[in-house]
Image (cartoon, grey):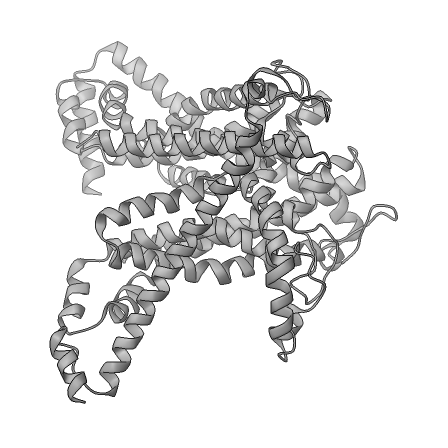
Amino acid sequence: MSAQKVQAGATDGWQRGGAQAVRRRIVERLVNVACSIATVVVLFLLFSILWTLVTRGAAGLSLSTFLHSTAAPGSGGGLANAIVGSCEQTLLAALLGTPVGMLTGIYLSEFSHDGKIVSFVRFVSDMMLSVPSILVGLFVYLVVVEPAGHFSGMAGTLALAILFIPIVVRTTEDMLHLVPRAMREAAYALGAPGWRVIVSICLRAARGGIMTGILLALARISGETAPLLFTSLGNLNWSTNLNAPMASLPVTIYQYAGSAYDDWVQMAWTGALLITVAVLATNIFARWWLSRNGTASS
Amino acid sequence: MMEASSTTAGQEAAASGRNAGGNAGDIAFGVLARLAGWSILLVMAGIIIVLVSGGWQAFSTFGPGFITSKAWNPITHHFGAATSIFGTLVTTVVALVFAVPFAFGVAFWLVEMAPPALARVIGMAVQLLAAVPSIIFGMWGFFIVVPFMAHYVEPVATRYLGHVPGIGLLFRGAPYGTGLLTGGLILAIMVTPFICSVMADVFVSIPAVLKESAFGLGATRWEVMRKVVLPWSRQAVMGGIMLGTGRALGETMAVTFVIGNSNRLGWSLFAPGNTIASLIALEFPESSAGSLKLSALLALGAILMVISFITLACSRMFLQRGIKN
């Protein structure tokens, strides 16, 4: 008892003796330990994934990975067509999606006087943000691939753009809301027309945040597999033709990882390492950039 | 309301001094913005219409029995949705059972216990976990987690939990490694960062006075969390969990690798199964245009759409109510 009192005196004042106080302290300690363990476990999983990718993927990394197209098992080859196909589809999707996404974000933020339909568009855009990506693939298959009669890089691009747009809508709207009202009013007071205020003042002030959003969206769609399975299908040969099936890193990884050939599985790991490094680097860069340039509006 | 009217007043003031060029620019810009906004509605409507009309053949052939039928037989042309709906729900529930406590633990640690500098770095690492492409989770799950489950987790679970009455049923069966439990675990890892970041945001946003007064009364951190922070942020936390649920329901690639793809419905969590998304990914390439099988897959897509739509609507409702508080 006296030892306990000494201990209680040594720590915070609220910790007095008695069974209830002891129980509260034990519970507090247990929760602390449990939360720390949870954090360690989550971090451990992240490192396990990265470690697996590095140890298994680096073995197959060489110059020919970037220079040669995918080849039959046992005959070497690389991932050049998949890398180029991924870049082409992702960048085109971003090019297609950025104007639409930004304009929609502006519509949601600046045209609220349009009434109920604006909040409905916001609701639908939020829904689209979370539509299972495989359903987008099915949609594009039925609307583009089936009528055209063949798979194509264009269809893949379209599917990625549909996933890209709602992310840009969300960031654009959020960032425009951060632009101070006084700034708009000052511009209006100078006689600027509405569209000039939005384009030259609001978008300019919010460009740091919007750029970050676009980069994060780019990272997100570049790792998507499901929407490409039924749209751009994958292509074992070099092709940059948007009207023909096109290879992409995620789809190539999917096809190779499940194959029975060791060198294809190795190639899948190498591709996995490449795509993860690209996606995580983009993420880190975007977040670093946001924290440095901050909300440019303030 | 005040703010909106002040903008309109500002726009009107500007309009009076506006030249013709500005006016034409305003009209053109307005048309562009509205077209973009409404095109979103068009795409969403398109997705729903295409899935439902594509699945109509299956719906009309099998009637309401499509949802309850366990069949999936391409040879006799009998298709049903029960197994894959069951797999989708079971993997999602397993994912939540593991993800919610972990997400809560990490969020609690980040907000209340970690030194700020460390919290920033670790918070970033958790966000990076959310950014890893789903196919990577699938590959890692297939080559690392599946053997681990088959050799260690599942035999041990059968040995110690298999004889417990009631829940023992869940932990019996051959330890393949692939199956509903593994699928659920991979999903748990994927959705934990999402739930965690919503929770951390909400926990930070609680007014400091509320927490400080509880600390002032001598409450421990856990008591403050349980009796002040959680009741205050209940709605928003639910919204975050629903958001994670929506992701788990529709996830395709990660699950496809580890689910084992088998049309089975039973108590064992170790048994291979399938989810709606994994079934579509695996069977779609093998179904010809216009076939009943394709229609059945599209019907499954429509069902998945409805399920995730309901989840997300709930999530939005909870989050909005939580933020209003």
Residue B22 or residue A284, whichever sits in front: A284
How far from the left and from the top, in percent, is residue B215?
17, 68
Instruction: Determine the image quadrant of residue A118.
Output: top left
Give the quarter of the figure containing the C terminus of chain B.
Answer: bottom left
Instruction: Look at the picture and state if A163 lies above or below A85.
Output: below
Q: Relative to residue A70, is residue B104 drawn left or right?
A: left
How far from the left and from the top, in percent, is residue A257?
65, 37
What number of labels is visible? Answer: 0
Instruction: Determine the image quadrant of residue A27.
Output: bottom left
Q: Relative to residue A8, is residue B261 drawn left or right?
A: right
Q: Relative to residue A36, is residue A42 drawn left or right?
A: right
State the residue at coordinates (44%, 60%): B100
Instruction: Look at the picture and state if A120 lies above or below A271.
Output: below
State the residue at coordinates (71%, 53%): B81
Instruction: Look at the picture and state if A86 lies above or below A128.
Output: above
Answer whether residue A252 is visible to the viewer in this image: yes
Which residue occupies the extreme bottom position in the image?
A: A1
State the residue at coordinates (19%, 89%): A1
Residue B222 or residue A190, whichever sits in front: B222
How far from the left and from the top, in percent, is residue B142?
62, 46
Give the quarter of the figure containing the N terminus of chain B.
Answer: top left
Answer whether residue B42 is visible to the viewer in this image: no
How far from the left and from the top, in percent, is residue B259?
66, 51
Instruction: Determine the image quadrant of residue B218.
Output: bottom left
